[in-house]
Amino acid sequence: MRSFASPIGIWSAVLVGIAATAVFGQSFVVFTGTAAYGDWYSDAPGVRRKITPADMPPPYATASANNGPSVVAGPPHPVPGRKCRLDLSSSS
C-alpha cells in the first residue's frame, strides 16, 4: 500500500518553514547606489548589492581594460639528472 504526502502536511511544512525564516532569519545589509560598487574588502556574509542601470556609468565613460596576453619566460632549468627538450611541433 502506497502512502502519499497529504496536501495538509505539505502546506503545514511550508508554513513552518516560512515562520522559521521570519523568526530566525538574518537581516541582510543592502548597498545601493555608489556604495554598491565595493571590492572584496567590503564583502562579508550577508552583504548584498543592488546595482540598477541608473547606478552604472554611461557607455564609454570609463577606460577599457588593457590586460591582454603576454609572453612569459620558460622555466630556468630542468631538474638535475633529467633531460628536457622543447617541443614546438604543435605550435602554429
Image: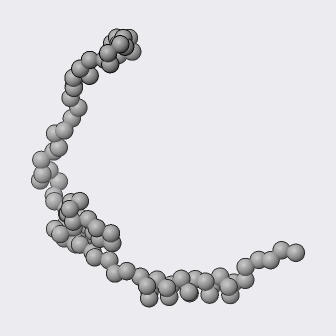
Vertical order, 88 against 19 (above or below): above
Camera-side residue of 11 and 63: 11
Does residue 2 appear left or right of residue 31 in this picture?
right
Occupied quadrant, residue 34: bottom left
Residue lying farthest front?
81
At 80% from the left and 77% from the top, the residue drawn is: 3
- Position of 91 compared to 33: left or right? right
Establish if 18 lies above or below 65: below
74 left or right of 87? left
Q: Where is residue 45 in the image (x, y as percent from the top left)?
A: 33, 69
In the rendered image, residue 24, in percent from the top left (x then y), is placed at 43, 85
Quadrant for residue 1, please give it: bottom right
- Whether residue 92 can be seen here: no
Locate residue 83, reporting x and y percent: 36, 11
**Is 73 on the left or on the right of 46, as rendered?**
left
Residue 27 lies in what quarter of the image?
bottom left
The answer, for residue 5, to whether it is visible in the render is: yes
In which quadrant will I find the C terminus?
Answer: top left
Render colour scheme: one colour
Q: Residue at x 49, y 85 (%)?
A: 20
* Along the line of sight, the residue nearer the viewer: 51 or 3: 3
Q: Nearer the viewer, residue 50 or 17?
A: 17
Residue visible at 27% across and 75% down in the picture = 30
Give residue 8's position: percent from left, percent from top.
68, 87
Q: Which residue is drawn at 17% across and 43% down?
A: 65
The residue furthest right is 1
The residue nearer to you, when weighing 81 against 65, is 81
